[in-house]
């Protein structure tokens, strides 16, 4: 329903930005995303708002309220309840999270102080390299099928 859109830069004569919106992130509504039930819920909300558009405030738009809660508090609460144990998957997720935080901070500083940004592919490659380096010589249960798949995908072994 909602997807994260990352700005690719552009020359809009009506909007000013020092870096042409490169790397800026906004939520964008995708009417083709989601399952049939979600799309039906969205269509019902749109119809309801249209039928009552003269009687309600724009802030009561149910379509806008369907945007996912992606706050840091929500994500941290979810991660702390889901990433428990010492499995290889849990370890990889924790390393990814720490790497993500570091690279967001680094990218912010790079953009603010140097006026440069990296592509998302470059950032993901850097995170994958960190995970691979952290787990390269670690003992893992290589007989487990899930671990084998994870080791292959992350270049561990």
Image: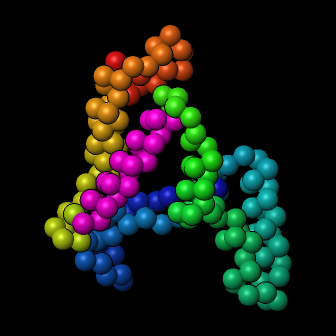
Q: Residue 25, image x and y in percent?
A: 43, 65
Q: Residue at x 69, y 84 (%)?
A: 58
Q: Is residue 138 above or below residue 20?
A: above
Q: Quadrant of residue 106?
A: bottom left
Q: Is residue 30 visible?
A: no
Q: Is residue 153 above or below residue 129?
A: above
Q: Is residue 88 above or below residue 72?
A: above
Q: Looking at this view, is 71 or 117 the one in front?
A: 71
- Position of 29 with respect to 12 (left or right) is right
Q: Residue 122, image x and y in percent?
A: 28, 45
| Residue at the limit of the structure toward the top, as seen here | 143
Which region of the structure is painted magenta?
90-109
Q: Residue 34, image x and y in percent?
A: 67, 49
Magenta residues, dominant SS class: helix
Q: Residue at x 58, y 39 (%)?
A: 84
Q: Quadrant of residue 57?
A: bottom right
- Position of 112 with respect to 53 (left or right) is left
């Amino acid at each position: 329903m909602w997807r994260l859109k990352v700005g690719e830069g552009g020359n809009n004569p009506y909007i000013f930005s020092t870096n042409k919106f490169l790397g800026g992130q906004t939520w964008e509504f995708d009417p083709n995303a989601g399952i049939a039930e979600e799309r039906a819920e969205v269509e019902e909300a749109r119809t309801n708002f249209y039928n009552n558009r003269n009687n309600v405030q724009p802030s009561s738009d149910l379509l806008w309220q369907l945007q996912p809660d992606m706050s840091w508090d929500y994500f941290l609460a979810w991660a702390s309840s889901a990433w428990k144990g010492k499995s290889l998957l849990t370890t990889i997720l924790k390393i990814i999270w720490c790497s993500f935080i570091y690279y967001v901070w680094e990218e912010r500083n790079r953009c603010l102080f140097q006026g440069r940004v990296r592509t998302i592919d470059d950032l993901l490659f850097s995170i994958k390299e960190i995970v691979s380096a952290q787990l390269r010589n670690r003992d893992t249960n290589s007989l487990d099928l899930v671990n084998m798949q994870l080791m292959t995908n992350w270049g561990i072994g």
